[in-house]
Image (cartoon, coloured by chain):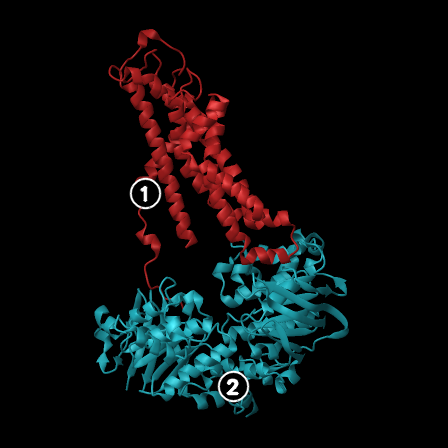
């Protein structure tokens, strides 16, 4: 047995963030630790390399790594273990790699100076990086997100450790890149390597892990073989995590409750937004970031734009928002010119088109409290004083935030609450069109489910049209009515969501669909509450 | 789950010594500036040749000068001139520096190039030399001294505000605020200026120290207010001839200049450190 932990307790300042955790990892096994932010999964993983953090009190009845009892380890013993026996892959490769050192130097650092250039290149090749020789002399910022993640994995396996810990290794990566990284991890598993995978998303671990431990509030609520946990989850929390994953089956229902969504009122004759032959070129080479993109959006309808980083989907959103001028083509709002207007003319109509950004926090003025943030969109529609206060409370209530949030500062809020504030702000002036650019991609699956439910509900009740940009096909198929698939600035496929996803014609759409993690069909669980009342 | 891997930077900060003493001293200077008669009953201008060059005593705390004027009274009344020159010069520099920096940061392009190059030229001269040149055109006097000192330190403010304006203008919340349909002027005053100019008060406090020193130095050279105004720098100049027989005439104003500048700098640096800690 490689890792044998019994009754692990980790506390900070008297609060226990991990309570009574048992974890065993056999050689050649992939174990996944799944839970939301704050469930204690990351600190558990860090305690395996003695990095639970200063001020952390780590105790265990039994804590054995590769035959050594680590409960009596001092810092130098941990240093000898890190990298050699356990390699650690952190979530964000951009901040985990030193921006001032070349990839080759970082590999040499990770192997404590022992790896030669040739070995470094072989290491990069083993994580699927082509042009390894060239990559060795590059800096992290010269690599794409997927390549950076590979380089980070290479540093973790540089000393061929017995166990690799990967903390959210694919979060913030595009679907197809995520698939490549998962494939890489799968290859290592076939080679007999041992892996501890940390994730908030059950779908990601679904076809990778042998065993799953589901953590909540510092405790393991359920554990067992992956197939069993996914097909017949026993604990309600595990079921909630599974339900939170958007899928073709979840269309038309709420992710958090499973209830049917309110029907949308789509008026196909009333076109709210029309984009015609949009072109936008950038740089000296005049590379087309957006190349002949056309679409329409009807009142009350939700249109999804799917694509990877660099596909031009965000540029389309920015053109629609009037933040970027198209080089060619035009945008019309409700039949009136929009992109052709000058900024002072456009300003008069801006209240009708609102924007929800991916990173809610950076979209708020740091000096503002929630009340001022939400109220600011009402400037343009001339709502001030008591009427403004009423409307702000109304929209905050609609996103399930009470009046006590008015004076709070966004920094004190959780990621989900911040996104709720951003949604409340967008709906406050009763816009006809809402543009949302990756509004849920920085959130945990369970929080993502709440935000998606909220967006669907508010869109249906208000009749607002929604332009929804995402790299996640699963999210798009859950929320939108029609979809555009973009690649390299062009629309490669478009149509009604159901038919595009059921019968994708373009190879790129098919690749995106394949990259979606698949969940096995669930054995329908009898609801314990209903069962009891029935008997 | 965030795990602290290192101690926060705050713990390693060097602490400025005696912040309370500095604050207390500046409070006394402030009282001297506003209500000098509270601190002394003597007239700083009225000469009394019979009392000339008396050493410090219970009657004349800092002694009397060559004309029999009470040195303590002159130092107290002098605070008004020295502080007036320092604060006004910094005020001129801070306001025009902020406006120039904001304009350069917002307009970019040709306007930015022009403003930046002019600032480069101005800051390539040593401050004191530049002030001397400006005064040689305008002539000595309190207001000319203020304008010259202010103009010389405009680049320091303008550069910081320009750099911050670039950062803030490109940030998410400014772009978001554009989509609200806010007027451009509203956008700038509400969302850009407060962040771009956040450091200006701190820079101004630190700049106040050097402005007071420069003002005293230039008054010493005769570029400041005319005699018999009890400005600290000109007191130094008047007392220098009597240094051997009556050291107190010049030592006290010199000591007060030193303590004032040290105190202003100490508080300014401390404020800056607190601000940086908050930003991190």
Position of B181 with respect to B166 (left or right) is right
Number of residues whose C-alpha sits closer than 10 Å to that of mark 1, classed few (under 14), some (14–19) or many (20 or more): few
Seen from this angle, which residue lies furthest front?
Answer: A285
The residue carrying mark 2 is A518
Number of residues whose C-alpha sits closer than 10 Å to that of mark 2, classed few (under 14), some (14–19) or many (20 or more): some
Q: Secondary structure at mark 2?
A: loop
Decide which of A488, A401 is in the foreground and name it: A488
Seen from this angle, which residue lies furthest top?
Answer: B50
- Residue A495 at x, y percent in the picture: 68, 80
The residue under the point 33% across, 77% down is: A157
- Residue B171 at x, y percent in the picture: 53, 56
* Residue A497 in view, yes or no: yes
- Residue A299 at x, y percent in the picture: 73, 71
Co-location on one chain, circles 1 and 2: no
Chain letter, colour red: B
Q: Residue A398 appears in which quarter of the rendering?
A: bottom right
The residue carrying mark 1 is B16
Decide which of A467, A487 is in the foreground and name it: A487
Marks 1/2 in contact by CB < 8 Å: the verdict is no
- Residue A406 at x, y percent in the picture: 56, 58
Looking at the image, residue A225 lies above or below residue A493: below
Q: Secondary structure at mark 1?
A: loop
Chain letter, colour cyan: A
Looking at the image, residue A193 lies above or below residue A382: below
Seen from this angle, which residue lies furthest right?
Answer: A269
Position of A186 with respect to B115 (left or right) is left
């Amino acid at each position: 047995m490689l890792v044998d932990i019994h009754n692990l307790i980790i506390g900070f300042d008297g609060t226990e963030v991990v309570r009574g955790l048992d974890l065993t990892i056999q050689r050649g096994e992939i174990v996944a630790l799944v839970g939301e932010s704050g469930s204690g999964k990351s600190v558990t993983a860090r305690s395996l390399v003695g990095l639970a953090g200063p001020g952390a009190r780590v105790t265990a009845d039994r804590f054995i790594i590769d035959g050594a009892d680590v409960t009596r380890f001092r810092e130098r013993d941990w240093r000898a273990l890190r990298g050699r026996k356990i390699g650690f892959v952190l979530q964000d490769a951009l901040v985990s790699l030193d921006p001032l050192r070349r990839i080759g130097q970082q590999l040499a650092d990770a192997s404590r100076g022992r790896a030669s250039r040739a070995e470094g290149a072989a290491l990069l090749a083993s994580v699927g990086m082509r042009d390894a020789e060239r990559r060795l002399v590059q800096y992290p910022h010269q690599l794409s997100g997927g390549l950076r993640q590979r380089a980070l994995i290479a540093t973790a396996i540089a000393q061929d450790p017995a166990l690799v810990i990967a903390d959210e290794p694919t979060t913030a990566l595009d679907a197809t890149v995520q698939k490549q990284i998962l494939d890489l991890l799968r290859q290592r598993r076939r080679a007999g390597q041992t892996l501890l995978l940390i994730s908030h998303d059950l779908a990601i671990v679904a076809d990778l892990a042998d065993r799953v431990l589901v953590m909540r509030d510092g405790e393991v609520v359920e554990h067992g073989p992956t197939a069993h946990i996914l097909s017949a989850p026993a604990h309600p929390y595990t079921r909630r995590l599974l339900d939170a994953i958007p899928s073709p089956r979840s269309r038309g229902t709420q992710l958090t409750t499973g209830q049917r969504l309110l029907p949308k009122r789509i008026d196909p004759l009333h076109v709210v937004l029309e984009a015609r032959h949009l072109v936008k070129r950038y740089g000296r080479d005049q590379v087309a970031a957006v190349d002949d993109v056309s679409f329409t959006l009807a009142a009350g309808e939700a249109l999804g734009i799917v694509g990877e980083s660099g596909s031009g989907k965000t540029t389309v959103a920015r053109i629609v928002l009037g933040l970027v001028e198209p080089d060619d083509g035009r945008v019309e709002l409700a039949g009136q010119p929009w992109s052709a207007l000058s900024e002072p003319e456009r300003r008069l109509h801006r209240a009708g088109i609102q924007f929800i950004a991916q990173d809610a926090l950076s979209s708020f003025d740091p000096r503002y409290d929630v009340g001022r943030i939400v109220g600011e969109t009402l400037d343009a529609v001339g709502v001030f004083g008591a009427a403004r206060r009423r409307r702000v409370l109304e929209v905050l209530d609609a996103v399930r935030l009470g009046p006590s949030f008015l004076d709070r500062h966004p920094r004190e809020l959780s990621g989900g609450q911040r996104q709720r504030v951003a949604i409340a702000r967008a709906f406050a002036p009763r816009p006809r069109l809402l543009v949302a650019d990756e509004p849920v991609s920085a959130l945990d699956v369970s929080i993502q489910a709440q935000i998606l439910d909220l967006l669907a509900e508010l869109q249906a009740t208000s009749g607002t049209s929604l332009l929804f940009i995402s790299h996640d096909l699963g999210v798009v198929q859950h929320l939108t009515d029609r979809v555009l698939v973009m690649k390299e600035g062009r629309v490669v496929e478009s149509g009604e969501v159901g038919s595009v996803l059921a019968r994708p014609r373009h190879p790129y759409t098919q690749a995106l669909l394949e990259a979606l993690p698949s969940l096995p069909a669930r054995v329908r669980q009898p609801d314990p509450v209903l069962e009891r009342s029935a008997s | 789950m965030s795990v602290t891997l290192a101690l926060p930077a705050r713990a390693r900060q060097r602490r400025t010594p005696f912040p309370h003493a500095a604050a207390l001293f500046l409070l006394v200077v402030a009282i001297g500036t506003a209500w000098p008669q509270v601190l002394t009953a003597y007239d700083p201008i009225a000469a009394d040749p019979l009392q000339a060059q008396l050493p410090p005593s219970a009657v004349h705390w800092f002694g009397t000068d060559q004309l029999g004027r009470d040195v303590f009274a002159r130092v107290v009344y002098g605070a008004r001139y020295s502080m007036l020159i320092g604060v006004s010069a910094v005020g001129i520099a801070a306001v025009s520096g902020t406006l120039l920096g904001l304009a350069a940061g917002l307009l970019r392009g040709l306007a930015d190039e022009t403003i930046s190059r002019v600032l480069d030229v101005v800051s390539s001269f040593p401050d004191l030399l530049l002030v001397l040149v400006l005064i040689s055109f305008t002539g000595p006097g309190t207001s000319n001294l203020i304008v010259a000192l202010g103009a010389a330190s405009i680049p320091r403010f303008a550069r910081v505000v320009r750099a911050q304006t670039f950062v803030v203008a490109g940030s998410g919340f400014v772009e978001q605020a554009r989509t609200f349909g806010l007027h451009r002027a509203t956008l700038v005053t509400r969302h850009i200026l407060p962040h771009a100019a956040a450091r200006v008060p701190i820079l101004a406090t630190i700049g106040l120290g050097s402005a007071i020193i420069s003002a005293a130095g230039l008054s010493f050279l005769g570029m400041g207010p005319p005699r018999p105004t009890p400005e600290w720098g000109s007191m130094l100049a008047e007392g220098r001839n009597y240094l051997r027989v009556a050291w107190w005439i010049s030592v006290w104003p010199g000591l007060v200049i030193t303590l004032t500048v040290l105190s202003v700098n100490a508080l300014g640096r401390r404020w800056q450190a607190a601000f940086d800690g908050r930003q991190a």
